Every structure is written in structure tokens, then in C-alpha cells.
Amino acid sequence: MFKPFVLIPSYNTGPILEATVKDVLAKTIWPVCVVIDGSTDGSEKPVVALAADESRLEVIRKCKNEGKGAAVRTGIAKYRACGFSHALVMDADGQHPTDEINRFIDSASRHPDAMILGQPVFDADVPWERLYGRKLSVWMVFVEVGGSAIGDPLFGFRVYPLRPLLSVMSKPGRSNRYDFDPEVAVRLNWMGVRALKLEAPVKYISRESGGVSQFHYFRDNFRFVCLHARLILQAPFRWMAKRSAQKDSAENV
């Protein structure tokens, strides 16, 4: 049975977290889970208060900051155990388009075995280093999956089928931080999960307007380098395993 929910991991997002959650609740009918990943700025307090009066909203608070991927794992494990089948994962910082949630979930309902991957449409305010810096990750993932099936691997506005996602994330220490988005997309592809790509606008919010970012260029880019080194070394073996599985499946038809 198709049973989706919206998952929003958050760490020190400030007042924009409450605005994002209210916007999601106003535009969708789906349950919303906010995972507070060890925040220290008090941003969870108004959302916890909101959850007291909103039956569709749940807030999970983690004592320690462990990263986006770990926060996503916490949310999907709980909701999978409660019978949910899919999660639309989005950021808490106001950059992802709440107007597109229903379109993405509708696509997932028609293609329940696929991952629905947002493809960013940037506005004129996008920082140049983000626009051009991500091109290397796009190229690396192109090599790792042998084509353009994934497109942009860094845009985290996506709908995942929970069963294969939990399988991919089951190995301890995998996909815990900002490497979550590219790693799970590549490994789901290797597993044979089809990707459907939908364009979605990105809105960059300046610090003066309340925008926040926990991305550290040296630390997190180094983490991406290490991730892609591992994936490229594994890629030939994964391609062979995937093709063998597809061949066996075709012969059994």
C-alpha cells in the first residue's frame, strides 16, 4: 500500500524551520516528521509547540548531532515500522519548493518502485561557487552509474521507497552526513531502483533574510572526495552484479 510522509531533517536552522514546517502543513495532506539533529539554537521549540496542536506533525529530537543522513535514517526507520512506504525528504532551510511536494508524491504513487529525484532549476541569486562546484559531483556520478540516470546528485528534494533505502543505509557509518544524497542515489541505482527525474526550482535565501547553511566547504568537500573515490573503485563490480541480475530476471520471464 502506498503510504507516504514528508521528512524534514534539521540542525540549527533558526526561525526559518518553523516557517518551512507551517508552509508544508498548509500545502499538503501528508504526515510530516521533523528530526531535530541535536540542535542547540532552540529552533525546535516553536515546532514542538505546533505539534501539540497538529496531529499530522511529529518532532523527533536527537541529543547529538550526527548529520543529515543519520537524521533521515532515524525518521525512515520509525515510519517504516509504522507501515509507511515512501518518504519525501526535503531540507528545513526554505530552499526546497513546498509547492512541488504534491507533484512529487503523485509521481511516486504512479511509480512506487522508483526514486523520484528533483533536478534543480536555479534562480539568478544562486552563488556561482555552488552552481559550478556541483558540476564535478554530477560528472563523477555519471561515471559511477554509467550514464545520466541520476542527473544532479546533490539536490536533496526527493521521494524514496523506504524498503530499498533502508537496505542501502543499513551498513553502519554509511551516508551519515552531506554525503547522504549522492551516495544513496548511486547505491539505489546499483541495486536496480529506477530513477525518475523531475525539475524543481531552488530558492537561495541570504543570511540577511534568515538563510542558514551548515555546509563547510573544506570539510564537506573533502568528504565528497572520499565518497567518490570509494564509489568509483566499487563501480565496475556493481555494474557487473547489476547486469547479471537483470540478465537472470529476463531469463526467468
Image (cartoon, rainbow, N blue to C red):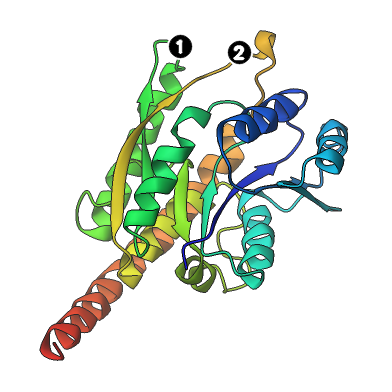
Residue 112 at what x, y percent from top left? 37, 62
Identify the residue shown where x is 87% and y is 37%. Answer: 40
Q: Which residue is mark 2?
A: 206
Vertical relation: 230 (above or below) 45: below
Taking 129 as reference, is 209 left or right?
right
Identify the residue shown where x is 50% and y is 74%. Answer: 167
| Most distant residue in the bottom direction | 252
Residue 103 at what x, y percent from top left? 39, 39
Q: Earlier in the sequence, mark 2 or mark 1?
A: 1
Taking 64 as reference, is 24 left or right?
left
Q: Which residue is mark 1?
A: 125
Taking 185 as reference, is 4 left or right?
right
Identify the residue shown where x is 33% and y is 61%. Answer: 232
**Number of numbered discs present?**
2
Vertical relation: 227 (above or below) 14: below
Nearer to me, 45 or 84: 84
Identify the residue shown where x is 77% and y is 34%. Answer: 12
Secondary structure category for the residue under label 1? loop
Which amino acid type is marked by label 1?
A: Asp
Name which quarter of the figure residue 92 lies in.
top right
- Residue 203 visible to an observer of this rendering: yes
Taking 191 as reference, is 31 left or right?
right
| Disc 2 to disc 1: CB gap under 8 Å | yes
Which label was assigned to residue 36?
none
Which amino acid type is marked by label 2?
A: Ser
User: How much space separates mark 2 and mark 1, taking CA atoms?
Assistant: 9 Å
Nearer to me, 42 or 135: 42
Quarter holding the C terminus is: bottom left
